[in-house]
Image: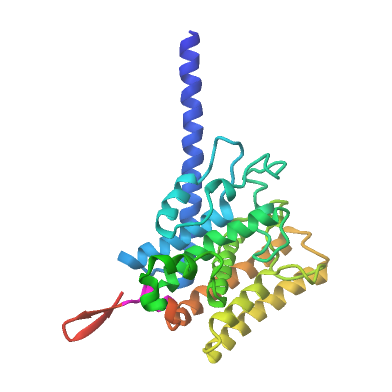
């Protein structure tokens, strides 16, 4: 009898463990799809090297933003880190970037992990050293995947690669792109929320309200866009105007009511987040296609007979 009980208990534990892993994978797939739609347009299909390039960036974002372990043996997303590290070659180990309960963290769960990683790209985080390293997962990956083509012969020299594409060598465009990827992820978390819970309030706000020095999603996105598309003035101004209109709506919701107090107000505020995301999906892909580092990584030309096919 005791043996049977132990067998059933073990099966239940395995079932819950599998369910947790499945839910985590499902969550990342959703974020991956949201990022793909924002960067390439809804319904766009990636293949070959372009698909691999995108997945490296998506995996880096998942590690940077959503990795956490509730105990010292869980080591969530460690295999993902190892796989990505084989391509990128990080200068740090998994232990240096793991968000784990008990290491500078009183309690970290699926409900509380956002407090450490979802409060803004440049937020003064409670674990500043950890967040600096976390950001390097994304910046080092974007730097190598997107900018390795622009260094010419230097990129072929093994001793130079570590300097050119290290996590510390990310140029302003690389930093701006990573910031944009980060905020697309946050917008995905806005999308899945159903009410103004404490968990939702851990997300970086759409607009500044009481603290005018803290990060705000829409203004941070705009600052990244200005760096990425400085030479696309007409398209940039059009996109910024769209976002500023949404920003004004979100600000009115906060200022007029002294914060979000009702479900109706939350729904209107959340819609502002959805509108930011949909605006990016509609206008961002065409602009990114004209940026060299992005076009070379995702729209490489292939000659086909007398014509050219873009993939």
At x 44% / y 73%, what residue is drawn? 147
**In the depicted view, which residue is nearer to us: 128 or 214?**
128
At x 55% / y 35%, what residue is drawn? 73
**In the depicted view, which residue is nearer to us: 170 or 194?**
170
**Colour scheme of the picture:** rainbow
**Residue 134 x, y percent position in the rendering:** 59, 57
**Residue 214 x, y percent position in the rendering:** 75, 67
**In the depicted view, which residue is nearer to us: 196 or 141?**
141
Asked if residue 244 is among those painted magenta in the image, a careful observer would answer no
The secondary structure that most of the magenta stretch takes on is: helix
Residue numbers of the magenta segment: 294-300
Residue closest to the far bottom = 234
Residue closest to the far front = 159
Residue closest to the far left = 305
Picture layout, residue 308 above or below residue 185: below
At x 62% / y 47%, what residue is drawn? 99
Q: Is residue 147 left or right of residue 109?
A: left
Picture layout, residue 146 above or below residue 230: above
Asked if residue 296 is among those painted magenta in the image, a careful observer would answer yes
Q: Is residue 42 visible?
A: no
At x 42% / y 65%, what residue is drawn? 54
Within the image, what quadrant is residue 122 found in? bottom right
**Residue 304 x, y percent position in the rendering:** 19, 80
Picture layout, residue 289 above or below residue 210: below
**Residue 15 x, y percent position in the rendering:** 47, 31
* Label total for image: 0
Q: Is residue 77 visible?
A: yes
Picture layout, residue 112 above or below residue 4: below
Within the image, what quadrant is residue 213 found in? bottom right
């Amino acid at each position: 009898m005791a043996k049977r009980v132990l067998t059933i208990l073990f099966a239940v534990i395995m079932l819950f463990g599998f369910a947790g892993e499945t839910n985590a994978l499902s969550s990342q797939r959703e974020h991956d799809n949201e990022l793909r739609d924002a960067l390439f347009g809804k319904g766009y299909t990636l293949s070959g090297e372009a698909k691999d390039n995108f997945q490296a960036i998506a995996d880096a974002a998942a590690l940077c933003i959503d990795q956490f372990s509730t105990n010292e043996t869980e080591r969530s997303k460690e295999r993902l880190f190892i796989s990505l590290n084989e391509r990128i070659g990080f200068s740090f180990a998994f232990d240096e970037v793991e968000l784990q309960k008990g290491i500078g963290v009183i309690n970290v769960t699926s409900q509380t992990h956002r407090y450490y990683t979802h409060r803004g790209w440049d937020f003064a985080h409670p674990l500043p050293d950890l967040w600096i390293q976390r950001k390097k997962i994304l910046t080092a990956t974007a730097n190598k995947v997107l900018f390795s083509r622009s260094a010419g012969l230097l990129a072929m020299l093994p001793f130079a690669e570590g300097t050119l594409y290290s996590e510390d060598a990310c140029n302003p465009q690389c930093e701006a792109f990573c910031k944009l990827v980060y905020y697309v992820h946050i917008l995905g978390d806005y999308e899945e929320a159903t009410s103004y819970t404490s968990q939702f309030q851990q997300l970086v706000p759409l607009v500044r309200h009481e603290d005018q020095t803290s990060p705000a999603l829409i203004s941070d996105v705009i600052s990244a866009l200005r760096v990425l598309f400085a030479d696309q003035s007409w398209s940039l101004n059009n996109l910024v105007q769209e976002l500023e209109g949404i920003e004004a709506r979100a600000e009115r919701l906060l200022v007029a009511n002294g914060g979000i107090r009702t479900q109706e107000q939350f729904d209107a505020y959340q819609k502002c987040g959805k509108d930011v995301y949909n605006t990016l999906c509609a206008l961002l892909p065409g602009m990114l296609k004209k940026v060299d580092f992005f076009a070379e990584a995702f729209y490489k030309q292939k000659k086909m007979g007398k014509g050219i096919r873009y993939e």
